Image (cartoon, grey):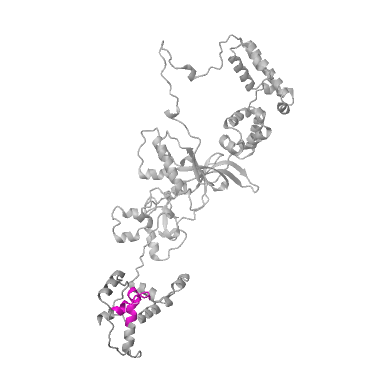
């Protein structure tokens, strides 16, 4: 294995079954016990982020594809689109330290170039690209600021060159502003003398200013500050505004209120603000937006950028650069990683041509072992390979061939786009068949898209649906046998079985007398107006003959009372409308 250097992109292995981690080495440090640790920048794959962020990344990729200037971009096949997603990474600002012994090889990661064809990333091995920045803590995706602006949208429109004798009809005042005339009446010596006078006025102004005398206590420091570019720019601008008249320009340098004091960002910033800027520069680099947001929010972005380029001309910058160079010399720049030859725990060992273990477990029966012998690769569907690797959960009994296992470890997916069981059945059979519809998953029945990340865990597991059909007698038993059933207590103890035989026996005892007659679930009620009208037309006539009441102990009386009770009460044990209003006696009188 080649020795990786600092700033190289490498593969890290943190799990024997998961894909490699892709990291960029920032530092190589030697620990106290002699081991080497690498401080790395984290890159994330599509399988490492949520579905909502994946949809956002797909939307961004579609917008980039529409705005791309390459008109001759070939149409990608489904396999190429599937494999291209495995080459996409997401940059992060997260750092971590990993043992250098976990490095498994080098790779290449580059910012997505819109002018190149996406097929160039598929044609090269161990090549990845990124265009978005992922924040693991906030779970957000943002466009990277290092965009290469290439194309006519970012270029100036250069007009055609004027022919000889053709006049330029453009308004020059709107195109540019003249700030200096090199063909003025003043000589170079006179201009230099005027600049010396401006420096002297600036030195005197700093001597009069209290804050400047504290920052530059010596005359030498005040003169050095007065000789900076801000003083010279002010002097030349004053000379140009007064049409290069020296007497008029000198009088402006020293107005009635005192000499003019010109300060730049180096003088305006305090010592504490300068220390904050150096600390922010050490943390964020030249990311001036983050420097302003986290360290110097009271400063404008223009002020921070201007101070940075002035700070680079100071001795402080030179000293820090020397210290960093000396510190870099003492650190490791390269580490040698020997070739990793240990066997992977996911290898399926074979004896006599038969697999002895899959996913680390022995087959439970002879049928399981025989089914594994003919199982093809889950990625390329080949039935033969010199080495097989278990892949996915142990209960799924999946395996990959040696080339597809290397592809899985490097790119985090399968070579071929996998299909769920519903998609495999779709071309040949329709979902109208009840046998197929029973075994379809809930996501496929509802039309919900299922994302495939190349992992068997992401595939949809089919579940058999069931329908609990309740008969009419069961519904009646719930109301009649409330004392025995006790639904509320049964719901609180779901694992205690219900004595169905006792409920059936009680229901049979209560309705043994009316087995032959059908039970009326609903009683037909007559409207009140109909009853009043009927009573007006047919008044009730009391019978003159008094009949003797039979004995309550006789079987006939018992049978009559039991029958009348069942006919007058509803299913729920409540009095119906006719019984409550005394219509039973009315019907008996009418029959008489």
Task: Say which of 108 and 239 sits in front.
Answer: 239
Task: Say which of 97 and 218 sits in front.
Answer: 218
Residue 149 appearing in the image: yes
Residue 86 appearing in the image: no
Q: Position of residue 433 (x, y in %)?
A: 29, 59
Q: Position of residue 473 (x, y in %)?
A: 34, 74
In screen coordinates, is 223 left or right of 555? right
Q: How many marks?
A: 0
Q: Position of residue 504 (x, y in %)?
A: 37, 78
- Quadrant for residue 558, please give it: bottom left
Q: Among all residues in the image, which is located at the extreme top?
A: 185
- Quadrant for residue 375, please give it: bottom left
Image quarter in which the C terminus is found: bottom left
Q: Is residue 285 above or below residue 400?
A: above
Residue sitting at 41 percent across and 12 percent down? 166
In screen coordinates, is 223 left or right of 540? right
Q: Is residue 374 above or below residue 509?
A: above
565 part of magenta stretch: yes
Q: Position of residue 579 (x, y in %)?
A: 34, 76
Residue sitting at 46 percent across and 37 percent down? 112
69 part of magenta stretch: no
Magenta-colored span: 563-586
- Quadrant for residue 539, please give it: bottom left
């Amino acid at each position: 294995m080649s020795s990786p250097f600092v700033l190289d992109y490498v593969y890290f292995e943190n799990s024997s079954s998961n894909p490699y981690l892709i990291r960029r080495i920032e530092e190589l440090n030697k620990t106290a016990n002699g081991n080497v640790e690498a401080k790395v920048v984290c890159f994330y794959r599509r399988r490492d982020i949520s579905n909502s962020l994946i949809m956002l990344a797909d939307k961004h990729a579609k917008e980039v594809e529409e705005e791309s200037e390459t008109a001759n971009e070939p149409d990608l096949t489904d396999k190429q689109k599937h494999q291209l997603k495995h080459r996409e990474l997401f940059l992060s600002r997260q750092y971590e330290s990993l043992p250098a012994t976990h490095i498994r090889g080098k790779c290449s990661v580059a910012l997505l170039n819109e002018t190149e064809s996406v097929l160039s990333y598929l044609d090269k091995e161990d090549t990845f690209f990124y265009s978005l920045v992922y924040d693991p803590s906030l779970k957000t995706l943002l466009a990277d600021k290092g965009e290469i602006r290439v194309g006519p949208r970012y270029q100036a429109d250069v007009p055609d060159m004027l022919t000889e004798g053709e006049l330029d009809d453009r308004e020059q005042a709107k195109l540019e502003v003249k700030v200096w005339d090199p063909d003025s009446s003043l000589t170079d010596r006179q201009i230099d003398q005027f600049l010396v006078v401006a420096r002297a006025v600036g030195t005197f102004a700093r001597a009069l200013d209290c804050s400047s005398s504290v920052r530059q206590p010596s005359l030498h420091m005040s003169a050095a500050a007065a000789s900076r570019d801000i003083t010279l720019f002010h002097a030349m601008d004053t000379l140009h505004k007064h049409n290069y008249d020296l007497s008029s320009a000198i009088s402006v340098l020293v107005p009635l209120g005192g000499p003019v004091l010109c300060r730049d960002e180096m003088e305006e910033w305090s010592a504490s603000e300068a220390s904050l800027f150096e600390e922010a520069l050490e943390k964020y680099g030249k990311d001036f937006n983050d420097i302003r947001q986290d360290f110097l929010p009271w400063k404008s972005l223009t002020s921070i950028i201007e101070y940075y380029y002035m700070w680079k001309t100071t001795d402080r910058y030179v000293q820090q650069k020397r210290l960093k160079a000396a510190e870099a010399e003492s650190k490791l720049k390269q580490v040698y990683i020997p070739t990793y030859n240990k066997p992977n725990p996911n290898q399926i060992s074979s004896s006599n041509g038969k697999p002895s273990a899959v996913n680390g477990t022995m087959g439970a029966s002879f049928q399981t072992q025989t089914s594994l012998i003919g199982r093809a690769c889950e990625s390329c569907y080949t039935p033969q390979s010199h080495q097989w690797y278990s892949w996915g959960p142990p209960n799924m009994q999946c395996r990959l061939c040696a080339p597809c296992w290397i592809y899985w470890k490097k790119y985090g997916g399968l070579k071929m786009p996998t299909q769920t069981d519903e998609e495999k059945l779709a071309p040949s059979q329709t979902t109208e068949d009840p046998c197929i519809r029973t075994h379809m998953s809930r996501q496929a029945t509802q039309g919900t898209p299922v994302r495939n990340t190349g992992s068997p865990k992401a595939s949809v597991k089919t579940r058999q649906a069931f329908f609990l059909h309740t008969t009419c007698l069961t519904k009646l038993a719930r109301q009649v046998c409330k004392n025995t059933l006790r639904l509320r207590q049964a719901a609180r103890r779901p694992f205690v079985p219900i004595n169905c035989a006792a409920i059936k026996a009680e229901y049979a005892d209560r309705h043994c007398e009316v087995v032959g007659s059908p039970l009326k679930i609903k009683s037909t009620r007559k409207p009140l107006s109909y009853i009043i009208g009927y009573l007006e037309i047919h008044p009730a006539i009391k019978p003159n003959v008094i009949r003797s009441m039979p004995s309550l102990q006789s079987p006939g009386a018992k049978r009559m009372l039991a029958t009348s009770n069942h006919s007058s009460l509803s299913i729920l044990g409540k009095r119906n409308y006719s019984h409550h209003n005394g219509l039973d006696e009315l019907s008996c009188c009418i029959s008489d």
